[in-house]
Image (cartoon, rainbow, N blue to C red):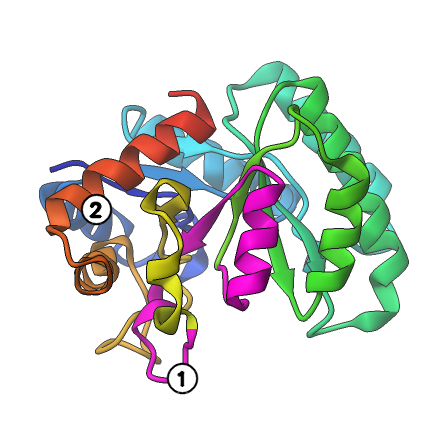
Amino acid sequence: MIITDTHTHLYSEAFDDDRQDIITRAIKAGISRFFIPAIDSTYTAQMLQLKQDFPEHMFLMSGLHPTHVKENYKDELIHVEQLLKSHTYYAIGEIGIDLYWDKSTLAIQEDAFRQQIKLAKANKLPIVIHCREAFDEVFNILEEEKGEDLFGVFHCFTGSLEQAEKAISYNMKLGIGGVVTFKNGKIDTFLKNIDLKHIVLETDSPYLAPTPYRGKRNESFYILKVLEKLSDIYECSESEIAKITTQNSKDIFSI
């Protein structure tokens, strides 16, 4: 059984003391493919080191995270583009809009989001979307950019059934992680209405650990709890969930 974690920040400082151990533990459990989203240029060296240390398992993204869109964001976008010329990347991400922490940067977040979507299209790459308290704003831009060359993953999907269907209409898979195991997560109440062909698994580690680890540091090994929950929701085996979601990830990331 091959399991794919489509979103994990394994280069995070949270793993500095035991990174090798937590990656090895995940691989031994069948979690053998890890997609690594970018935040900003300060993490580039760590991401490249991760790829060097585990070349068969790590698949990197290039991008500028919306919470890190600051006054220097145009310089950061140049860095994102330059990386594509010197290394292999499988997506532009994570990109999008976050209005939870700072609404004052909305205009430059929108500009950065648009520019990175265009960069993804130019390089025939998927996008990986971060959206927090910004569904309307994200959907407005996706509506502007929609087309066969727009596709990717709506990371850490936490919206409604209607919003899920809208995201799918823009050629987005839904990234489902620990939130699906939360009592107040809500997405478990309608997820069965979404065909599995639209779903990929993720952890977003070290964040959003699933129950019973909620509140603790998340890690890729815990994706097994997400797999278990989806098996209950869809009333099929964990191996079937793993097979379908891994194939979905292959379709998106062209691997």
> Is residue 221 a member of the stretch shown in magenta?
no
Q: Which residue carries the number 2 mark?
A: 241
Position of the N terminus by quadrant:
top left
Residue 98 quadrant = bottom right
Left or right: 105 in relation to 43: right
| x and y percentages locating residue 100 in the rendered image | 69, 74
Q: Look at label 1 and name its amino acid.
A: Asn
Q: Residue at x 54, y 19 (%)?
A: 87
**135 relative position to 130: left or right:** right
Horizontal and vertical percent position of residue 197: 36, 40
Cα distance between the residues tagged 1 and 2: 23 Å
Q: Is residue 70 left or right of residue 165?
A: right
Q: In the figure, 57 relative to 241: above or below?
A: above
Is residue 181 rendered magenta in the image? yes
The reply to whether residue 209 is in sight is no
Between residues 6 and 69, which one lies in front from this camera angle?
6
Q: Quarter-wise, where is residue 106 in the image?
A: bottom right
| Element marked by disc 1 | loop
Residue drawn at the location 42% of the way across and 48% of the way down: 7
Q: Position of residue 174 (x, y in %)?
A: 46, 50
The image shows residue 210, relative to residue 55, as above or below, that is below
Query: Is residue 163 at least partly visible in the picture?
Result: yes
Residue 97 % position (x, y): 72, 58
Disc 1 crowd rating (10 Å Cα; few below 14, some 14-19, many 20+) is: few
Question: What residue span does the magenta drawing correspond to?
Answer: 157-186
| Amino acid of disc 2 | Ile
**Precedes in sequence: disc 1 or disc 2:** 1
Q: Residues within 10 Å of mark 2 (few under 14, many from 20)?
A: many
Q: Which quadrant, please, contains the C terminus?
A: top left
- Dot 1 corresponds to which residue? 184
